[in-house]
Image: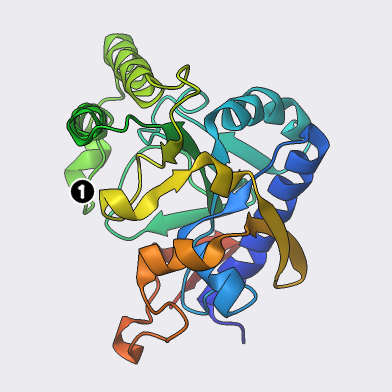
């Protein structure tokens, strides 16, 4: 019988296939990031114990994808979840959800739409001065925290949560304003095309580890990922060394655990580990 992680991977491959086909149709260069980039290079697919997929686009390409993908997805079982398309969604980046599935995540209880997903990150220009970098990141993190609180994101479930009234129109409007402020902070340097570096401001890694030169993310090569062919930066070796050090060495077995999903509903069945 397939393990939960194997079932998740099969659905995520469908999400990734849909995403890459859309990018090809829209002529948008995308690239694998983080653990997905590591998986592509070290495993030619998923890290066997990793249960998510991370892809990225430069901000201008990301904005085009967000604007044009929903029409292409209209007659599919995929949903492009963004701060605008889901009023209960608090995160700063998009997810492509399989609407035929339902999930429960570890340490992440909220009222946003649920489904097996891949993460789609925008890469934004950042200033060169460290003080200005800290200021931008600090503003982003403050607004992000306020949104998580406003939209009732919790680490653990609480039976009383189900008794809460839905958010009022005024509360939704306040959250929308915070989302707009956050995006303005993320894109405040976007028009300065002389700035050579971009960053995933929502990164889980230390600030300096996920700074890229724009040139790194426009020089892409195809590599295998399971049965797919996907795009990664040609400079993947230096990128992975920045993120993980000796990235070809497997971590201890005690660290080979899934990070996100603990319960999945698909094909009218419930699956857990």
Q: Quadrant of residue 179?
A: top left
Position of residue 192 measured from the top left corner of the image (x, y, whole percent): 45, 19
Query: Which quadrant holds the C terminus?
Result: bottom left
Identify the residue under disc 1. Answer: 159
Position of residue 13 measured from the top left corner of the image (x, y, whole percent): 67, 62
Q: Quadrant of residue 75?
A: top right
Q: Tag 1, which secondary structure?
A: helix
| Residue in the image at 55% along x and 52% along y | 118
> Residue 19 versus residue 207: which sits nearer the camera?
207
Query: Relative to 103, does residue 170 appear above or below in the rendering?
Result: above
| Residue in the image at 52% along x and 75% along y | 47
> Residue 271 versus residue 223: which sits nearer the camera?
223
- In-image side of 122 versus 99 (left or right): left
> Residue 77 versus residue 237: which sits nearer the camera?
237
Query: Which quadrant holds the N terminus?
Result: bottom right
Position of residue 185 measured from the top left corner of the image (x, y, whole percent): 32, 22
Using a 10 Å C-alpha cutoff, classify the residue at mark 1 as few (fewer than 14 neighbours), some (14 to 19) or many (20 or more).
few
| Residue in the image at 32% along x and 13% along y | 177
Residue most toward the bottom? 253
């Amino acid at each position: 019988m397939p393990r939960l992680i194997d079932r998740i991977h099969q659905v995520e491959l469908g999400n990734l296939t849909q995403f890459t086909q859309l990018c090809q149709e829209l002529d948008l260069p995308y690239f694998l990031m983080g653990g997905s980039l590591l998986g592509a290079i070290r495993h030619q697919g998923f890290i066997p114990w990793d249960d998510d997929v991370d892809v990225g686009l430069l901000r201008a390409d990301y904005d085009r994808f967000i604007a044009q993908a929903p029409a292409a997805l209209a007659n599919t079982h995929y949903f492009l979840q963004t701060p605008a398309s889901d009023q209960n969604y608090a995160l700063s980046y998009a997810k492509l959800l399989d609407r035929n599935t339902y999930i429960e995540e570890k340490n992440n209880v909220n009222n946003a739409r649920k489904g097996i997903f891949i993460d789609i990150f925008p890469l934004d220009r950042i200033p060169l001065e460290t003080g200005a970098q800290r200021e931008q990141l600090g503003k982003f993190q403050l607004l992000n925290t306020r949104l998580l609180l406003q939209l009732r994101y919790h680490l653990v479930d609480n039976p009383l949560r189900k008794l809460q009234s839905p958010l009022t129109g005024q509360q939704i409007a306040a959250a929308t304003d915070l989302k707009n402020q956050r995006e303005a902070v993320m894109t405040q340097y976007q028009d300065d095309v002389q700035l050579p570096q971009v960053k995933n401001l929502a990164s889980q890694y230390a600030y300096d580890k996920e700074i890229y030169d724009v040139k790194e993310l426009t020089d892409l090569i195809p590599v295998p990922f399971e049965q797919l062919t996907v795009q990664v930066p040609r400079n993947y070796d230096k990128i992975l060394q920045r993120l993980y050090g000796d990235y070809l060495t497997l971590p201890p077995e005690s660290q080979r655990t899934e990070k996100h999903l603990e319960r999945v509903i698909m094909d009218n069945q419930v699956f857990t580990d």
